[in-house]
Image: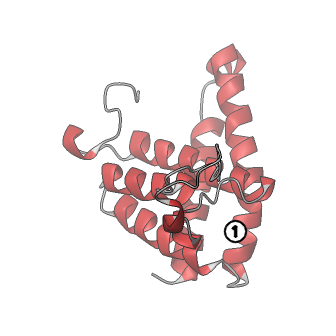
Amino acid sequence: LDQDVILKFIQFLLHLWAKDYKTRSEDSKRSLEAKLAGATQRQTESYLKPLLRKLKHKKTPRDILAFLTIIIMSLLEREYVKANDSYLQMAIGNAPWPIGVTMVGIHARTGREKIFSQNVAHVLNDETQRKYIQGLKRLMTFCQKKFPADPSKSVEYNAVK
């Protein structure tokens, strides 16, 4: 999947989310829940700006781009469980110790050699990455609410309303 396609899809979802919020009635906009939802939507937009910039200039890190491709393709197919699995793989990886702790005692861990680039969590690399990865998860949740699928293909089906 091309970076342009990923960029357009993320922009489409952001636009749809903003439009949904703006088309609410004035009474519902005044409720605390609606104000929080609006703030979350605006915050998500600001969190995703660095990612959108990287996609636009085609400077997205390869490892993140690979996961983004799987996530976006899964969202387009309404395979939300698959998208969530890929998101978790990107966010926390499958490192034996995702937070990078390798030496906790006087002996080296037996699986220490398993810790390499693919297994390390990206969410801890820097604050900007953490924010756009979090923003991506919010966008995935919105996508599932907006375009529902079978319960077997949805994440926390009963929790999403």
Dot 1 falls on a residue whose secondary structure is helix
Residue 88 visible at all: yes
Identity of the residue drawn at 73% across and 84% down = 57
Q: Residue 90's spot in the image, x, y percent?
A: 52, 60
Q: Is residue 7 above or below residue 57?
A: above
Q: Is residue 71 above or below residue 157?
A: below
Q: Residue 95's spot in the image, x, y percent?
A: 51, 56
Label 1 sits on what residue type?
A: Leu
The residue nearer to you, when weighing 12 against 97, is: 97
Q: Residue 112's spot in the image, x, y percent?
A: 53, 61
- Work out which quarter of the rendered image holds the N terminus and state it: bottom left
Identity of the residue drawn at 68% across and 55% down = 132
- Relative placement, left or right, of 74 versus 42 is left
The residue nearer to you, when weighing 24 against 74, is: 74
Q: Is residue 147 above or below residue 93?
A: above
Q: Which residue matches tag 1?
A: 52
Q: Residue 41's spot in the image, x, y percent?
A: 67, 41
Residue 31 visible at all: no
Identity of the residue drawn at 41% across and 68% down = 70
Identity of the residue drawn at 55% across and 49% down = 97
